[in-house]
Amino acid sequence: MGKVYVGLNAEFSRSSDKSFEWAVQEAAKMGYRWFEPMVHFGRELMSEAGYFHTVSLFDDPFRIKEACDAARLEISGLQCHGPLGRPDIHGEYIKLAIRAASEIGVPVVNTDEGIKAKWTSEEEDFVLMKYTLREAAFVAERRGVKIGLEPHSQYSKTPDGLDRIYHLVDSPAIGINFDTGNAYLAGEDVYAWLNRVAERLVHLHAKDISVEHSDAERGKVTGTPVGCACGEGVLDWDRIVKTVQDKCPRDIVFSVECGTPGQAAKSLEHLGKLVQST
């Protein structure tokens, strides 16, 4: 079975109003060895000014690689969320992200189905998602990059819904990026769902949910941008680590999704002990 490694998603720096390069350096200072950058399509003011952590796909992707190399960080995946059911928005975006990932040696590009168009039916949405995924898979298959589908929105909020999206396209390039916090907040049994997808897992977003957050939103939402520090919320991380180690055939990075540098440091301390002890 595969090994589990602990990494950090760049979202931890969102509240700090700092650049991508700052986020990389902070992750390395904390002791992380894996990092998940977030990329966006086109240009936007905040990241260009150095106040936000995402990197434009219009930049040379070696900007990402060189920053992580300098900090001695391995890149676990690129976060590239967008509405799969809207090819006009996510079609070229995800394909360009896959090409960038391939160019700099990143194994996974993570996405979800995103927020649907208001005027489309469910049947139409699945046709559109199939189109976007099939086109993306053609690009990914040639390059050996995996597409990690994440539970996050209206259709992927249940195990059956996520599987329905996964089975739209028969491709070795498509796998699952399981988000523990999203699955929990959607009201599902996180451990049963993880066990169900473990053999298809290519990446994992390690997101814990505080008791207060759980009381306020569980069963009412399909996900959340970030959670609390791993080990300070409701999830049993020892059980999650052991499930992945026992069931997943490949090595998996647990990419921590939290809201602050302090939470990121606490998450590494908690998860690091569990990984080392098993």
Image (cartoon, rainbow, N blue to C red):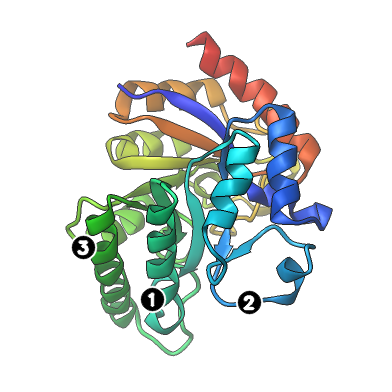
Who is closer to the viewer here, 270 or 136?
Answer: 136
Q: Amino acid at mark 3?
A: Val
Q: Position of residue 182 (x, y in %)?
A: 54, 50
Q: Which residue is mark 1?
A: 91
Left or right: 192 as drawn, with respect to 133: right
Furthest toward the top, the residue is 277
Q: Position of residue 258 (x, y in %)?
A: 68, 44
Image point (60%, 20%), residue name: 272
Q: Which residue is mark 2?
A: 43
Q: Amino acid at mark 1?
A: Gly
Image point (73%, 30%), residue name: 30
**Marks 1 and 3, how far apart in space?**
15 Å
Q: For the residue labelled by badge 2, is the local secondary structure a helix, a strand or a loop?
A: loop
Left or right: 72 as drawn, with respect to 103: right
- Residue count near mark 2 (Cα–Cα under 10 Å), binned few <14, some 14–19, many ≥20: few
Q: Earlier in the sequence, mark 1 or mark 3?
A: 1
Who is closer to the viewer here, 278 or 211?
Answer: 278
Residue 169's disc is 3
